[in-house]
Structures are given as C-alpha cells and as structure tokens.
Image (tube, grey):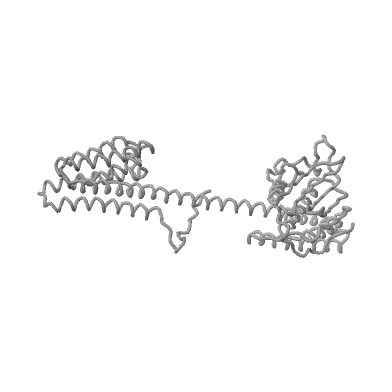
C-alpha cells in the first residue's frame, strides 16, 4: 500500500500520547535529574574548574542514558552498548573520589541502564548490586545510616522511574505503529470488499446488457417492435447497474431474492430459455437474502457466458432452520470432455467448488467471492456437474448460525415456469 493512513490523535478526553510527546517528556525528566545533581554541586560553591568538570561529567552521563533509553535514535552508540554501559559505570563511580557525597545520587541512571540493556535476570541482579554499592559507598564516605538509607531509596525509585519512562516511550511508539498497520489493513479490507461487491453486483447486469444488445441488433432489420422492447430493457438494466455502483460506494446494499428471481425469469424468457423458478423460502434475514440474491446473479452470469443453456431451474426453500438455494442448468459439457467456446467451464478452484465464471476465466474469483460470503454466514457453497449435461450451483445456510432471528417481510415470491 502506497499511501500512509493517518490515525486520529484523539482518545478519552480528546488526547492521546504521541511518540514525540513521550520522548520529550522522558528527556525533560532526565534533564531534571541532571539539573538536580548539578544544583547539589553548586550548593557547595566549587571553583570554576571543579564546576566545569562536574558539568562535563553530568553531560556525558545524560548522553549515555539517552543512548541507552532510545537506542534507535542513536544507532551508532546503540550497537556498542557494552562499551557505553562500562563507560557509564566508570563516570558514575570514579568522580565520587573528587566530589564525595555530592555525586552519590548518580547511580540511578546506571541502575536503569542495566534493566534496559541486560536480560531480565542479569538486569535485576545488576540493579540490586548498584543499590547495595550506593549504600556501601555512603558508609565509606562517612555519612550516617539515615543518609545511606535515603540514597538507597532514591536510587531504587529514580532508577525505576527512568526505566519505566524509557519503556513507556517504546510502548507508545509501538502502539502508534500498530494503529497505523490496523488502519492500513482496514483500508485493504475495504478495497477488497468494494472490488468483490462491484464484481458480484455488476457482472449479471453487464452480461444482460450485452446479451440484449446482441439480440436487439439481430432484430432491428426485421422486427422493430421487439427490438425497441429489448433496447428498453437494456436501458432499465443499465440504470440498475448504475444504482448498484452507487450502492457499493455507499458500502451498504440489501437485495431481494424474490425480485432477483423474477427479473431472472423475465430475462431468461426473453432469451428463449425455459426457466422454472420457485422461491418459497419465506421471510429471511436481510444479510441472508442479500447473499442468496448475489449468488443468483453470479450464477446466472456464469450460466449465460459459459453454457449453451436451454433449460434452467431456480429454487429457494426452507427445511426447518436451513435455507437451500439451487440454480441448475443444462448445456454443460459431459464429464471429462473439455469445454468449448460458449460451453460451461470446469469447477472454480478459488471457491473450493463452483462453475467457471467470467472472473475465473480472467484470473478473478467470482465463485470464490460467493463461497466466502456464504461461509461468513456459516453456510456452504458447492457447484459442479451433477448429472450428464447439467450444472448445479447450490448454497445451504443455517439461519441460526447466520443470525436468523433478524427477519424482514419478504418481497413477492417468484414462481412458475
């Protein structure tokens, strides 16, 4: 997918923590800790050289901690973390000889870095070792037990704060990456749905337009009135196709199985095909009726394009809580005999079972789309030769699995021959 899909920066309260904001907050906290340490040094009124040395060492500690907390931002240092960790340990403990108790609060950064860089077991062991070392160092300097306890608690809390903020920044960035990926997946699924609906809805209409235009072209020289009727049908079908395109663009389309069956009977009669239509499934949930109407459209498209059909049977009946739709036609080739131009094709492998379709012949997945739609409702779609010269497309849907309680008043059922 080429374009980047923006994710809205909003959530509960109208705000979300963006990765840049998380990084800025973490850096400001690190600067705050460094500033407090420099303030302790300034409180002792050191000389210019001593103050400059402390500022330089604190800057080195800050840079090393930022490299450990955000290794992706400084990849050159991130790849050399053993060296930078050793350097941080040296800068943490060696200056104690010159600055005494003023430097004893700096092990917090080192404790956090051990948790960030080492495996969990080693990291927590190193964290505890840093706390113990800080306590022992305070006793070596000569401060009281109370000060040693205070430094130990400060090292633990500050180290955990630094570690937590660093991990939180990583989690915020990961959440935003996941959101962008989910948005991209949603766009891809919507494109797939649009392409599938466009094929399923327009295949039948465009096939009917083509066949009626060919029939009208043959009738014009001899039978003007029937030709005008066929052209009127073409106009009506093209308007329906336009309405279908607009319905797909809106993302919602309900279809009536009874109306589709009646339209199919009229079109087949105009083409000289003997059709038996029986739709007596009763009221159906809108989703089930829409899917079965789409199966009827696609099946007729396949039949008219890929078979020399003379007889056709369309039926939809309910057996308890199971609805069965069946579309059968003659004119299919005998098993083992290759299909001829205009003949019915082989089963569509994309759908697991199904007749050759216009989409299948062109590398598409017309029957495959129908099989996927029926499976979403907990049903099955099968298609293939059932007896010599006949091809059968059948969909079976369990109304309970498909949400069968949501029913609507059915459209007038089509029946007759």
Asked if residue 368 lies left or right of residue 108, the reply is right
- Residue most extreme to the left: 47
- Residue most extreme to the front: 145
The residue positioned 86% from the left and 42% from the top of the image is 389
Asked if residue 171 lies left or right of residue 249, the reply is left
Q: Nearer the viewer, residue 153 or 244?
A: 153
The number of callouts visible is: 0
x, y (%) of residue 302? 77, 48
x, y (%) of residue 289? 75, 58
x, y (%) of residue 10? 46, 61
User: Does residue 337 sit above or below 356 in this rendering?
Assistant: above
Q: Nearer the viewer, residue 373 or 98?
A: 98
x, y (%) of residue 72? 37, 43
Asked if residue 258 lies left or right of residue 137, the reply is right
Q: Quadrant of residue 364?
A: top right
The residue positioned 84% from the left and 48% from the top of the image is 328
The residue positioned 31% from the left and 49% from the top of the image is 157
């Amino acid at each position: 997918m080429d374009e980047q899909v923006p994710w809205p920066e909003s959530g509960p309260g109208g705000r979300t923590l963006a990765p840049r904001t998380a990084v800025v907050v973490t850096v400001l906290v690190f600067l705050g800790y460094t500033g407090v340490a420099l303030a302790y040094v300034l409180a002792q009124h050191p000389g210019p050289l001593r103050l400059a040395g402390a500022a330089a060492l604190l800057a080195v500690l800050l840079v090393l901690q930022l490299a450990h907390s955000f290794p992706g931002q400084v990849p050159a240092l991130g790849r050399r973390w053993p060296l930078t960790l050793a350097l941080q340990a040296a800068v943490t403990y060696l200056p104690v000889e010159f600055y005494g108790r003023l430097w004893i609060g700096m092990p917090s950064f080192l404790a956090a870095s051990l948790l960030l860089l080492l495996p969990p077991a080693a990291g927590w062991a190193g964290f505890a070792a840093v706390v113990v070392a800080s306590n022992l160092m305070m006793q070596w300097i000569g401060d009281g037990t109370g000060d040693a306890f205070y430094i130990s608690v400060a090292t633990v809390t500050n180290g955990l704060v630094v570690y937590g903020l660093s991990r939180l920044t990583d989690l915020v960035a990961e959440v935003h990456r996941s959101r962008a990926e989910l948005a991209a997946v949603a766009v891809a699924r919507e494109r797939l749905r649009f392409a599938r609906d466009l094929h399923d809805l327009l295949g039948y209409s465009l096939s009917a337009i083509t066949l009626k235009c060919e029939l009208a072209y043959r009738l014009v020289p001899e039978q003007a009135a029937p030709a005008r009727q066929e052209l009127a049908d073409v106009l009506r079908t093209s308007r329906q196709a336009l309405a279908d395109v607009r319905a797909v663009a809106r993302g919602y389309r309900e279809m009536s199985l009874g109306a589709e069956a009646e339209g199919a009977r009229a079109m087949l009669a105009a083409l000289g095909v003997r059709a038996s239509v029986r739709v007596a499934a009763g009221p159906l949930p809108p989703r089930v009726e829409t899917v079965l109407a789409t199966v009827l459209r696609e099946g007729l498209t396949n039949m008219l394009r890929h078979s020399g059909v003379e007889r056709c049977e369309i039926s939809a009946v309910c057996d308890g809580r199971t609805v069965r739709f069946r579309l059968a036609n003659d004119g299919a080739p005998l098993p083992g005999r290759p299909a001829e131009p205009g003949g019915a094709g082989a089963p569509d492998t994309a759908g697991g079972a199904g007749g050759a379709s216009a989409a299948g012949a062109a590398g598409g997945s017309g029957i495959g789309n129908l099989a996927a739609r029926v499976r979403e409702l907990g049903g099955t779609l099968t298609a293939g030769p059932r007896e010599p010269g006949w091809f059968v497309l059948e969909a079976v849907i369990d109304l309970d699995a498909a949400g069968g309680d949501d029913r609507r008043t059915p459209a007038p059922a089509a029946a007759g021959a």
